[in-house]
Amino acid sequence: MAIAIDIQSVSRTYGPIKALDGIDLSIKAGEFFTLLGSSGCGKSTLLKLIGGFDRPSEGRILFDGRDVIDVPANKRPVNTVFQSLALFPHMTVAENVGYGLKLRGVSGPSLKAKVEDALDLVELPGFGPRTIGMMSGGQRQRVALARALVMEPGILLLDEPLTGLDERLRQQMRDEFGRLHRRTGATFILVTHNQDEALSLSDRMAIMHKGRIEQLGVPAQFFECPANSFVARFVGIETLLKPERIEMRDDGPHAIVAGQSLRLRSPEASLGADGLVAIRPDRLRISENIDIADLVLTVVETTFRGLQTDVRLTFADGQSLVAVVSSDSPTATVNPGTQVPLSLLPDAAMLLSGSGMPPVA
Amino acid sequence: MNRRPLALIASPLLAILMLGVVPLVLVLVWSFWTWDPATYWIKPDLSLAGYGAILDAGRWTVIVSTLLKAAGTAALCVVLAFPIAYAVHFLSGPRLQTLLLALITIPFFTSYLIRAFSWRLVLGRTGIVNTTLQHLGLTQTPVDWLLFSNFAVVVGLVASYLPFAIFPLVLAFRRVSPDLMAAAQDLGAGFWRAVVTVLVPLTMSGIFAGFLFVFVMVAGSSTEVQMLGGAGASIVSVMINDVMRVANYPLAFAISTVVLAVIFALVLIGNAAFGLASLFGEEER
Amino acid sequence: MTRRPVPSAFASNIGRRQILKLMGIGGTALAAGGLGLSLGGRALAQEAGTVAFWATATLDIADKWPEFATQSGIAPEFTDNGNDLGPVIARLAAGNANDLFDVGGFQGGAEKELARQGAIVPWDLSKIPNYEGVWSWAKDIAYLKQDGKQYGIPTVINADSIIYRPDKLGKIDSYGAIFDPKLKGRVAMEDAWINSAIFTAMYLKESENQPIKDPGNLSESELGLVMEFLIKHKTDGQFRTFWNGWEQGVQLVADEEVDAMTGWEPIVYEGRKRGLQVEYAAPVEGYEGWGNNTVLLKGAEDRGTTEAAHRFVDGLLGGFYGCELGKARGYIVPTDKNLDYAKAHPTEYAPEEVEKLAEHVKAKFAGKVFWQNARPDNFQLYEEWWQKLRNA
């Protein structure tokens, strides 16, 4: 049922523009795989190539080992939930969902039954006779999903499917994707620019940038071991410090920033030319005791964010980092200029090489 | 009530009234009057003589053949305009799109008299088509039916009025997201199936508008028939001119009224079925 | 359907006339509205010594009118009347044309109807000294006089027959060629009953001894005879097409679409200019004579501008106008004054050319001539038959 995808040295150029630059990627059958990146990174182009809406300039694409480059979109075992949803506005919900089945020759009661099942699956029972214009944004999303899923595809492509939905619906649909993935067992490929979606849904994901894959792996790896500053920023590690030097000490490598020492996670770290130190905000703690603190920094400002408060702290050389504290802690209301002791939990600081990929898990 | 908006719509309203409604009402009313040999004009003796005369001398056959010609040409224009609009919308970038639309507009810049006339030079006994056919050995003597025939008339009409079908279709295509075609294909439809099940229904307002524009233009045309048609070939406009020359105004008005009634009926039916107004609405989602 | 002007110096020019024809359905309403609209004319010609001249475009000498004014002392304001007699008569009878114009220049045949309507008044020939110089056979055109009074002054005259290709057909001297089955699909006539019906009637009367009295004014039964004959040939595929207007006529000959067709003589000149061997036949059945006559509108009398109108028409017959019209369009004003003027002004108009043109037209009129009639008694029946022909 589920289909494995092999993408081998695939490039796609549009005139002088290289939208995809030598992509090698294997997606396992039944995997929930996410392509994460900002607009123009090539993720949608890659999706089009998998869907059969475009041809690569170079390279091969294999489904379960079979080259599909010459197979047109309508003959591929792939269905897509488009970013625009692309529901047919001149058809009812049921006609939309039944469109593909009808082309397959399904008709009569079995068509009706399958369409109803699909609508049940996306929790829109009985919505069949409605027109698309009568449906809300979230409901349309579900119709689009039902329309794709009813085809029982080996591969389901989701192209930014949550764009344009409000936060609550977004969360709801995200759960829905997970549920449907488990239920159908198909290979899901999600394209998104939203790291939360990627991190919460994916079995594995890839971050793309300028037509290349920057990092590939299970979501946790992107936090624990971001390949470079681009990836680090993309997964939400905002704090990137430029160290004066790296020192090897007994307990491992340390980065020296404005005279203060930060213990680095990576045991084999050595300072590259553009090496930066990434600090995971979730592994910083405001410490009670200034004597056992790893760092002492000066508060610049605090930003209230509901349950949590961001505290921006600065080093002597002006570089700064953000610590997240509970809004009811005393630090949340500390005055700018105050000196605050910080402790680093294990693996809070890591040295980035600035480019290149870490070994894939 | 605020007077400014009222003043704003008053002048276009008046213009429509004066330029559109008043002449039409006059044509309708005068079609029931009687020609007066004493004044060479018409007098308000109500009569159906004008309408009765339509049944004489085969005049009604001209009306029928005009409507058939108009419908046939309009259908042909739409069939030709559809792929052109498709290419303009889906296959070309913004710059190429502008260029294509400019090329389509070019027929508007040459006089339609000259355009129709030049078909005589192309389709005639010594025209390009015949000389080519003879050169290729496909025929010994020139093919006569190419010119001064209904074939030539339809060629001339299509060439003249094709842009009137293309522009509403381009407008209609603008409202169809390319994703919809992709979605149809994604769900298993081949290209043609996608065109028939998605593109055609969604551009129906444009198809109808294009059809209607061409239909109306052909119903009011005379040049192509006069220049390219066979001996004495007629069309409503030619007949009306013939009738006007002998001052038979009620008959001329009656013919006009019948044709206008058909066109109005077509507009009303078409609008009810295809919603012309939606042509100017926002993109389908 | 009536004669459209040959363009000045035969220059190619798809004209205003056809534009009018194109107005089609909407045009009906517009034309009807136009009957009541002021188009200038009298308003422009209010000052003494001016005349509002409402005529077919054939009579226009355009930028030469100022010179005409200098010579005759009358400044005409020319307005094109569109040449279709139906609307013209309606505007005179029921519209405001008599408020606007002093002198009309119309195709021959409408005088009777216009006089009956009281739309025109007789000329006083004693105030037109140049009338004496008009060729006598031109003075004899039947339409000019009604009840012994002079309503029309012949201003332009010519005679039409068949344009043909002697290289293909040899010499042609009968309209029979037009109806000869051997020439099936290789002949044409004009898309105008005003000319095509009379040609056919002339042929039937003269060569087939059919009982037709006046080919220019057919009775109901004569018209049926003539039109049935035409319809039979049309349905047999005899005619390649019916032509409309100058350019189309020229093209039919120039591009060898037809070998013979009834039509205007200038088409022959144009064909020759394009290197074709084209002749104008002198048919045994005779020529179709046609004239544009000037008439005095009732409005001139009401406004007291008849003196100026008479001087204006006298000027038209004075020589200069005839020379200019002959030079520009090849049309002749039927008077020897043209030659006198050319002899007196040889640098402007070559006397031998003027004489040649005059002799040529005179020669045509030396034989049999049937006069074109723009308004036969059964004119609405003509139209009805023409529709039957179209739809046959």
Image: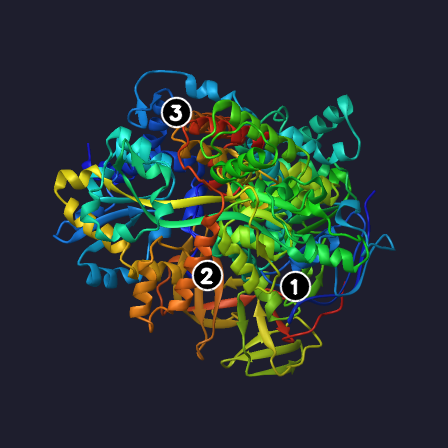
Label 2 and label 1: CA atoms lie apart by: 72 Å
Q: Residue at x 41, y 44 (%)?
A: C20
Residue A279 drawn at (x, y percent): 56, 68
B77 or C225: nearer the viewer = C225
Quarter of the N terminus of chain A within the rendering: top right
Mark 1 packing: few (<14 Cα in 10 Å), some, or many (20+)? many
Q: Please state the horizontal and vertical placement of residue C227, each as a whole percent of the image.
A: 56, 30
* Amino acid type, callout 1: Met
The residue to which callout 3 is attached is B250
Task: Tell me, for residue A308, which label it has, or none.
Answer: none
Q: Do the residues labelled 2 and 3 touch (CB within 8 Å)?
A: no
Q: Is mark 3 on a helix, strand or loop?
A: helix
Residue C176 point in image, percent of width and height: 63, 41
Q: Disc 1 on helix, strand or loop?
A: strand
Chain designation of label 1: A
Q: Nearer the viewer, residue C366 or B183?
A: C366
In this rendering, the answer to whether C250 lies above or below A140 is: below
How is the model colour-coded? rainbow
User: Which amino acid type is marked by label 2?
Assistant: Ala
Residue kind at label 3, given as amino acid type: Pro
The residue singled out by tag 2 in the image is: C11
